[in-house]
Image (tube, grey):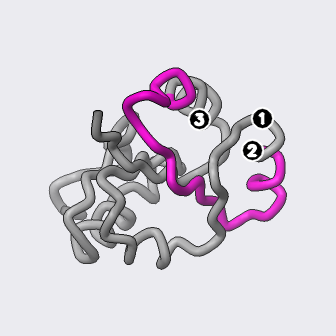
Amino acid sequence: MLKHRIAVIGLGMAVTPHAKSLVDLKDRVEVVAAFSPSEARRKSFAEKFPFPLAGDLDAILADKSIDCVEILTPPNTHLDLVRKLRGSQETHPAGEAAGGLDRARC
């Protein structure tokens, strides 16, 4: 079975239930990068989960082999991240909510 290649952006408060689900889905998905600009957050995440870490968002955006990006950052950052994803490749963003969006910003 072909696995979906996923990157996780944001390793803060929202990540634990998502990461646990991704572990449970290991037969269907391959997490290829777990990104945070914070080295401390990456280190803490690595102690709990077996996913490859990334400190370079641009490298994730440039990786055309990634099928989906899970956006788990603060809501006010979602729109800018989706715009970067849309401009970089055919990756599908996923997230909990489209917080901070309004017609004026879109």
- Front-most of residues 40 and 30: 30
Instruction: Name the residue: 41% across, 37% down.
Output: 29
Q: Name the residue under label 3.
A: 14
* Amino acid at dot 2: Phe
- What numbered label is drawn on residue 48? 1
| Label 3 CA crowd tier, 10 Å (few <14, some 14–19, many 20+) | some
Q: Which quadrant of the view contains residue 54? A: bottom right
- What numbered label is drawn on residue 45? 2
- The quarter of the picture where the N terminus appears is top left
- The quarter of the picture where the C terminus appears is bottom left
* Amino acid at dot 3: Ala
The magenta span reads 22-44
Instruction: Name the residue: 33% across, 72% down.
Output: 84
| Drawn side of residue 64 relative to residue 32, left or right | left
Instruction: Name the residue: 60% across, 37% down.
Output: 15
SS category of the residue bearing label 1? loop
| Label 2 CA crowd tier, 10 Å (few <14, some 14–19, many 20+) | many
The earlier-in-sequence mark between 3 and 2 is 3
Is 64 placed above or below 48 here?
below
- Front-most of residues 21 and 73: 21
Residue 14: % across, % down: 59, 35
* Residue 36 is one of the magenta-drawn residues: yes
Residue 37: % across, % down: 67, 67
* Residue 34 is one of the magenta-drawn residues: yes
* Amino acid at dot 1: Lys
- What numbered label is drawn on residue 96? none
- Front-most of residues 23 and 8: 23
Residue 82: % across, % down: 31, 61
Q: Do the residues labelled 2 and 1 touch (CB within 8 Å)?
A: yes
Taking the view exactly as shown, the residue that stands out farthest to the front is 1
SS category of the residue bearing label 2? helix
